[in-house]
Amino acid sequence: MSETVRVPVALGERAYDIFIGAGVVERLGAGVRELFPRGRALIVTDEHVAPLHLAKAQASLDGAGVRHQAIVLPAGEGSKSFAMLERLMAHLLDARIERRDAVVALGGGVIGDLAGFAASIAKRGVDFVQVPTTMLAQVDSSVGGKTGINTSHGKNLVGAFHQPRLVLADIALLETLPRRELLAGYAEVVKYGLLGDADFFDWLEVHGPALVDGDRPARIEAVRRSVVAKARIVAADERETGERALLNLGHTFGHALEAATGFGPRLLHGEGVAIGMRLAFDLSVRLGLCPGQDAVRARRHMAAVGLPTAPADIEGAAGLGPALAPAALIGHMAQDKKVLDGKLTFILARGIGDAFITQDVPIEAVDAVLKAA
């Protein structure tokens, strides 16, 4: 096992540790045994991850004497649904999972969100452990306790705040990711630089290409800096009543684009965030808040590593027609869970590393940015 980095999430009695490094999945058994002395676990994973990583997780649990079962669900955003939640809940209950047992989410953001939400409502709350297998999940969705599913009304509108007991971010697992999936996760890394750490964005401009190409030390450092930033924000604002909303930079636009494309494979979440961040910076420039050169830097860096930066970059965009029209996208934004008193909430920027939250955005400006994108 390579050098391991520990990042604490300071939430009082709900505090937990994130371990980052190559091979940290080997800590799973010992971690579960320490946190759950009864020694029982249910692994929740999907059809893409199971052939690659399930055996590693099971071997670690076996080595620590932890009895376990596994359920393998369909892969993809479509699994964040009421139907799949019902299937998972039936399995949890059939397995007689108790509050002293562990649910282990082994997968990307979809599995983490779904398994975490199921754990939050099973028997009024059982504990869970995150073993994120994608970059997006390692730097973002596995940390902070947001869980949930999608509905026809929008993304993540049904869910709960339910903190994990432990997060194991094994960067060696990222080496099995398709490049597109890795890039989608990298968009969330870029987000941390753009929203609050200009020095980190400078670092990414230099090291980002090597990180994407497989540089392990760069990946460890990027995951570390991302989760340190997120852990600080979550500790200050666990339930997103204030500062934590900054983590949604690019998400108001991005979620609307995901809804317009049916939450399907033509637009991954991180890709939607990348386009959304470009649009958020364009909107900031249009409103006279942000220097134009900062918006250009953000867009150029994402494009340079291969991320989409405009709705036209979405697979099959030409055939989507009215679904990507500004009026349709603004309609999706109106369903966003961040809407307050009927007003859209945007995360805008005064420059790279200086994001802020506002509801004072004229719809006409949003419409103009979408039309110009």
Image (tube, rainbow, N blue to C red):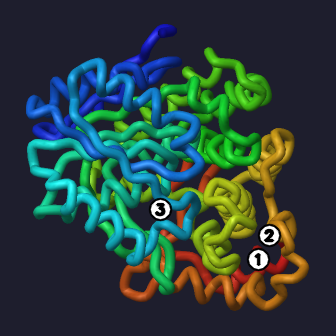
Name the spot of residue 343 as percent of width and height, x first: 46, 83
Q: Amino acid at mark 2?
A: Pro
Name the spot of residue 34 as percent of width and height, x first: 16, 24
Please indicate whether residue 37 sits to the left or right of residue 61 in the image.
left
Q: Amino acid at mark 3?
A: Ile
Residue pointed to by mark 1: 370
Name the spot of residue 163 as percent of width and height, x first: 26, 47
Q: Is 37 or 260 nearer to us in this picture?
A: 37
User: Residue 162: in sight, yes or no?
Assistant: yes
Q: Earlier in the sequence, mark 3 or mark 2?
A: 2
The label nearer to you, 3 versus 2, is: 2
State if disc 1 and disc 2 touch (CB < 8 Å). yes
On the image, which quarter does residue 302 sit in? top right
On the image, which quarter does residue 201 sit in? top right
Please indicate whether residue 349 sits to the left or right of residue 309 in the image.
left
User: Residue 348: in sight, yes or no?
Assistant: no
The label nearer to you, 1 versus 3, is: 1
Residue pointed to by mark 2: 311
Please count the marks in the image.
3
Q: Earlier in the sequence, mark 1 or mark 3?
A: 3
Residue pointed to by mark 3: 357
Q: Secondary structure at mark 1?
A: helix
On the image, which quarter does residue 269 sit in? bottom right
The label nearer to you, 2 versus 1, is: 2
Q: Earlier in the sequence, mark 2 or mark 1?
A: 2
